[in-house]
């Protein structure tokens, strides 16, 4: 008997022989590997699809959130609260700069050029000197682009330091 299953990664619907339940296969749509779950009989699924529209309306469907949906855009107030010097609630530990936890510092190369001198290496060394070695989680190179004052797009680099602040 054939059963209907969905890929757990991309939700691609497939019809397979129930003898394949429990086997590991690659999804034909997304090529990701998964174990075939127990599905619903194919004839049962076809009957549900063939129901008249008025009967389908009687049965409320559970709406599942889309896996690839983007989070909602933050409001102007939420964005303003993230700016340096913004008024913050003392109860909000996530936004409290003195709270212990994970901190991230990004240094962009183009912001480290002063009067034609490249101060990037010195700025990175200065930052790393202020953080105890055991608190550094990672130092990651970055590639980014920006528009210069003439409107040209410039490719540049930087570094992101992730560390613990106790």
Image (spheres, grey):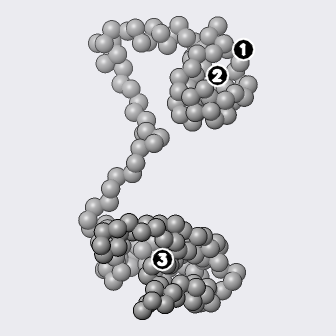
136 in relation to 3, above or below: below
* Foreground of the two, 148 or 137: 148
Q: Is residue 20 left or right of residue 59?
A: right
Disc 3: which residue: 108
Identify the mark nearer the N-term, 1 or 3: 1
Please give the name of the residue rendered at 49% of the width and 13% of the height, measured from the top-left corner: 45
Q: Is residue 25 left or right of residue 78?
A: right
Query: What's the mark number on residue 38?
Result: 2
Q: Secondary structure at mark 2?
A: loop
Please give the name of the residue rendered at 53% of the width and 7% of the height, measured from the top-left corner: 43
Query: What's the mark number on residue 19?
Result: 1
Q: Quadrant of residue 102?
A: bottom right
Find residue 141 and report its horizontal and vertical position in percent: 58, 70
State the CA–CA distance, disc 3 to disc 2. 51 Å
Find residue 52 and report its horizontal and vertical position in percent: 33, 8
The reply to whether dot 1 and dot 2 touch (C-beta < 8 Å) is no
State the CA–CA distance, disc 1 to disc 2. 10 Å
Q: Quadrant of residue 163?
A: bottom right
The reply to whether dot 3 and dot 2 touch (C-beta < 8 Å) is no
Q: Nearer the viewer, mark 1 or mark 2?
A: 1
Q: Is residue 10 left or right of residue 50?
A: right
């Amino acid at each position: 008997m054939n059963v209907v299953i969905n890929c757990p990664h991309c939700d691609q619907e497939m019809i397979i022989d129930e003898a394949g339940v429990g086997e590991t296969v690659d999804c034909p749509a997304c090529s990701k590997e998964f174990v075939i779950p127990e599905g619903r009989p194919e004839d049962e699924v076809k009957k549900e699809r063939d129901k008249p529209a008025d009967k389908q309306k009687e049965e409320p469907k559970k709406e599942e959130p889309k896996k690839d949906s983007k989070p909602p855009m933050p409001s102007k107030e939420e964005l303003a609260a993230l700016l340096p010097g913004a008024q913050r609630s003392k109860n909000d530990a996530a936004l409290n700069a003195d709270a212990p936890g994970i901190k991230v510092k990004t240094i962009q190369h183009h912001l480290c050029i002063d009067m034609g001198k490249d101060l990037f290496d010195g700025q990175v060394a200065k930052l790393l000197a202020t953080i105890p070695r055991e608190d550094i989680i990672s130092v990651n190179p970055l590639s980014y682009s920006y528009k210069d004052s003439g409107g040209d797009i410039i490719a540049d680099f930087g570094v992101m330091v992730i560390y613990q602040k106790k």
